Amino acid sequence: MSDIAPDAPPVLRFAPSPTGLLHVGNARTALYNALFARQWGGTFILRYDDTDTARSTAEFADAIAQDVAWLGLAPDRVEHQSRRLVRYDEAVARLKALGRLYPAFESEDELEAKRQSRRRRGLPPVYDRAALKLTDAARAALEAEGRRPHWRFRLDGRQVVWDDLVRGRQGVDTATLSDPVLVREDGSYLYTLTSVVDDIDMGVTHVVRGEDHVTNTGVQIEIIEALGGFVPRFGHHNLLVLPSGEGLSKRLGHLSLRALREEGEEALAVASLAVLTGTSLAVEPSASLEALAAKIDFAKISRAPARFDPAELSALTAATLHHLPFEAVADRLAALGVGGSEGFWLAVRGNLARLGEAADWWRVVEGPLEPVTAAEDAAFLAQAAALLPEGEWDQEVYPRWISALKPASGRAGRALFHPLRLALTGCESGPEMKALLPLIGRDRAAARLRGERA
């Protein structure tokens, strides 16, 4: 970890566009940033990339806030790019004054025709900078036709090199790239500009994101340097894919956090699988986000795509529940109408696949319950009721009861235990009766053994 240990408390950000629901791939990026900040006592910023007013909605922004909260991530700051337009105006004016931002008038059809022409000649489809050769008179003529320019950042055309937190030494030759458009024809700003300005203004020290942004990094470093900003450390993690190998998509709703939440998956299990999948670390239940944060090591992230298997998530949700302490679930149990204490939780958690199933066991404990009895077991169950121990019912009441019932009834094994479980719980299987019986209590137990609804 020494090679990525920050010299001062780091500042990281997660900058989603509120144009759809977050999926587990987005959660992976959010978690890496938030947990790295937590690990090193830094700052985590949730920043909405919402300058695309045609596609950004308040509903999706609210959904993002809910998903981030569900994951247990509490941003230290929340920012909206739509509220920072003045700063982008200032940055654009500065880049124009430096001669780094120039107007280009080609339509999308004209640009596509140029790209196709270059491909036919075996050349990369890179913008030819024709706009830089326009005379003032030519620009005025285009404007007179009603054309409005988009504005491109003039790249240096050099090798931009950085030490990537995940991938090691990386380089991008910006001579092989098109000068990026930073301002659209309608005057709206693209992510490439707004992200850089925000990172500079907000003192972002580490940018951790998906490997699909590697090429963007060379461009953004040039823009940062042109604006005189601090160049943060970059890290590009591998991307999550479906078991089929298909990439995740907000537009298609793949593995959205909202859907996983509604299906009863545990947020801590989602976090563990999203962070640990595609690394050299074992995928296992985490006791807390703090424990998961302590495992963050970018050097252990694989370069290959990471397959996120929903079946593995379901198993991890169950395993996570089996280890959670009562205080971690008490509020959610109360919301389910479960009034149980720590004793109830410790009794049932090992049998849960989803937290909601705890409500079923609460109904078993509290009743009323219709016991399941067979005619051939009636005499045995009446005998069992008569032998129920008196006095305090603790964890030893069940063994004491069985010790008395076994010789008295002459039964053993399944013939002894199965009718008792059916009568007392109405279920074929479940938590240990040693733990359940004290919770059911003597009166309810006696009534159920007699075949009464209790």
Image (tube, rainbow, N blue to C red):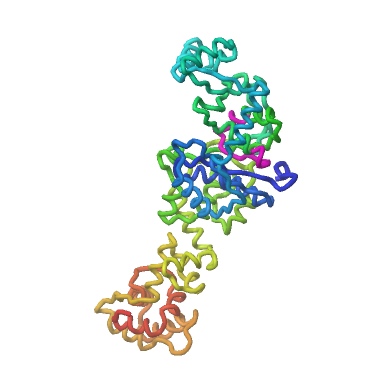
Q: Is residue 309 visible?
A: no
Residue 176, compared with residue 194, is above or below; it is above
Q: Is residue 211 magenta?
A: yes
Please tell me which residue lies in front, 22 or 300.
Answer: 22
27 left or right, relative to 386: right
The quadrant in which the C terminus is found is: bottom left
Give how far across and how far down residue 282 sits, in percent: 57, 49
Judge whether 52 appears above or below 260 on screen.
Answer: above
Residue 17: tell me if it is visible.
yes
Query: Residue 111: x and y, percent?
Result: 48, 17
* Residue at 44% across, 36% down: 54
Say above or below: 202 vs 378.
Answer: above
Q: x, y percentage for residue 102?
A: 60, 20
* For residue 9, above or below residue 445: above
Magenta residues (range): 199-217
Query: What residue appears at the point 43 percent right and 83 percent down from the top-left corner?
Result: 401
> Quadrant of the image for the N terminus?
top right
Q: Is residue 221 left or right of residue 82?
A: right
Q: Name, please, the residue furthest toward the front.
A: 144
In magenta stretch: residue 206: yes
Residue 285 in the image: x percent, y percent? Answer: 54, 56
Q: Residue at x 51, y 43 (%)?
A: 26
